[in-house]
Amino acid sequence: MTSAVKVRKVGTDKPPTRASKFLQNRWAGLAGLLIALLAPFVNASPYALSVMTSAAVFVMLAAGLNIVVGYCGLLDLGYVAFFAVGAYTSGVLATRFDLPLPVTVPFVIVVTVIAGIVIGAPTLRLRSDYLAIVTLGFGEIIRITANNLDVTGGPSGIYGIPHLTESPVVFYYLTVVVVSLAVVGAARLGRSRLGRAWRFVREDEDAAEAMGVNTYRVKLAAYIAGAVWGGLAGVLFAAHLSAISPTSFTFLQSALVLMAVVLGGMGSIPGVVVGAVVISLLPEILRDLADYRFFLFGVLLIVVMLLRPQGLWPARSREVS
Amino acid sequence: MTQLVWNGLFVGSFYALVALGYSMVYGIIKLLNFAHGDLYMLGAFAGFAILGAVGGVSASMALPVLLMVLVATMLLTGLAGVALERIAYRPLRGAPRLSLLITAVGASFALEYGMRAAAGADPRVYPVRLGGTSLEVLGARLTLQQLVLVGVAVALMVGLNTLITRTREGRAMRAIALDPRTSSLMGVDVNAVISRTFFLGSALAGAAGVMAGAYYGKIDFLMGFLIGLKAFTAAVIGGIGNIPGTMLGGLLLGLLESFGTFWLGGEWRDVFAFGVLILFLTVRPTGLLGERVTERV
């Protein structure tokens, strides 16, 4: 009877092949960065730069959600709420109080940490599936609130947010630098003592608790870290588009970020980065399939979970070897 | 005042119908079926298609025809629910909870945007509107068809409750909820019972979809998203997994929303509902009638 129960693990026990050794290599990350830095030399039209900047912001979102879903195993279906909180906080401060955008960053961090605690503190004590729905509801609350309040500009949102730099190329490079730092930061965090605790909680929460890990605090830390990453990505988003409105922060966005994380490989930084780039560039390539795109995404989510739950570029833990 | 109560009870009976499917599935296999709200949407569209195939319906025949469409739609969405479980959920029954939740999100997405590809993104107008003769009861205006819809909803819920508490099938469901492995040793065909549970829950959601379509007159491919969230809220308020509790939760959420809209204005209604959800999860996560569940290690 026991043999009928399939046990699925994240990661595999197979010995590394040459290809997977390369993927493990630290050069993979540098190669990715090089591609991002050289891309404007291939095509530097304003449209292409805008698409690439959006893709970079999306990578940062995915890296943040990966902390919550990939490292800690908590399903957050309203991740875009933190993105919205960050974008709106910096947008409101920049337009109403004439603060330059970099000055708004500390405020954004404080506000997203508070938002993370408000949502995380009551729900992280409960079963993980409750968290999924509560975050979904939270995403809607933030969007509807932004839609109804005057200070956030109602349905038309905030416009006229000052650009960080005049030139889109410089802004693109700035975004790439910030996003790279964020990705490396998330990876380092994942390998820290806290990161090991996260993975322990993901694999077996009861065992972690029995070994003396304060699972509640560890989960809250993951949730808050994810919130801060999302909020900072929101600042970049606001600076990039210079206008934000509630329609940018729907459930669809949250689902797309989740899609990037799951497709690439939960808990695997290179996988998540590649997943995010693919998900954000795919619509540009597959314009003709626009009607079926989200349908295919849904089917793909199911297929990946059934056939390859570890994602296309799975995480391998260093401790095992 | 009575008007608010009546409005609340009316909307609440829809919530309760959808929430029951959520609650049944959760009670038995501890899975949050995110696609449940989309089965409600599927029901509305299936009813729409059947009504379109039947052709013009005279106003006097609207109610009986609608009831027949209701039954046909329940069958269809029930089967869709069974298929969903077979394809997306059953293969992952031993897998980590996170995988199941993600396939559920994927299923919800596929249903929503599959319907969008099939029926278009614009809202459709239901071919049958229940024209209203309104009556005055205790100072509240209510229409005959509201009464009929609530009547149908109550009949379905009572039927379900009898099925679960009184029949052999219901006993099998409750046994699986307690312990699936032992029930299979005792001769319960676990997979078949879970399939039938999905059938029942999805059929109820489909029924609610047709009724909402006929009552509000407009349907679109995203209509299930919000109602799915609301239904979950209703289930949590009453105690998820507990059938009478879920019905109570649905009615209570309807009432809360009705009064919340009155106090705060319609644009805050959904924020209010989710606020209640978060409050309940903080203060009383088991819901009003739910029992304390200890997790087995």
Image (spheres, coloured by chain):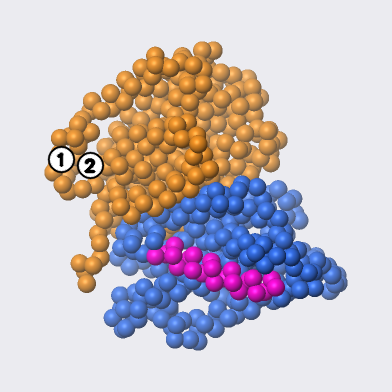
Chain colours: A orange, B blue
Residue A298, x across and y down, in percent: 45, 49
Q: Nearer the viewer, residue B295 or B63?
A: B63
| Res A306 → quadrant | bottom left
Residue A257, x across and y down, in percent: 44, 40
The overriding secondary structure of the stretch rendered in magenta is helix
Question: What residue is pinned by disc 1?
Answer: A16
Q: Which mark is residue A316?
A: 2
**Of the residues under marks 1 and 2, which one precedes in the sequence?**
1
Residue B41, x across and y down, in percent: 59, 59
Specify the subunit that label 2 lies on: A
Question: Do the residues at discs 1 and 2 belong to one chain?
Answer: yes
- The residue sitting at 57% across, 66% down in the picture is B205
Range shown magenta: B65-86
The crowd level at tag 2 (other Cα within 10 Å; few <14, some 14-19, many 20+) is some
**Label 2 is placed on what type of residue?**
Arg
Q: Comparing marks 1 and 2, which lies closer to the viewer?
A: 1
Residue A46, x across and y down, in percent: 51, 17
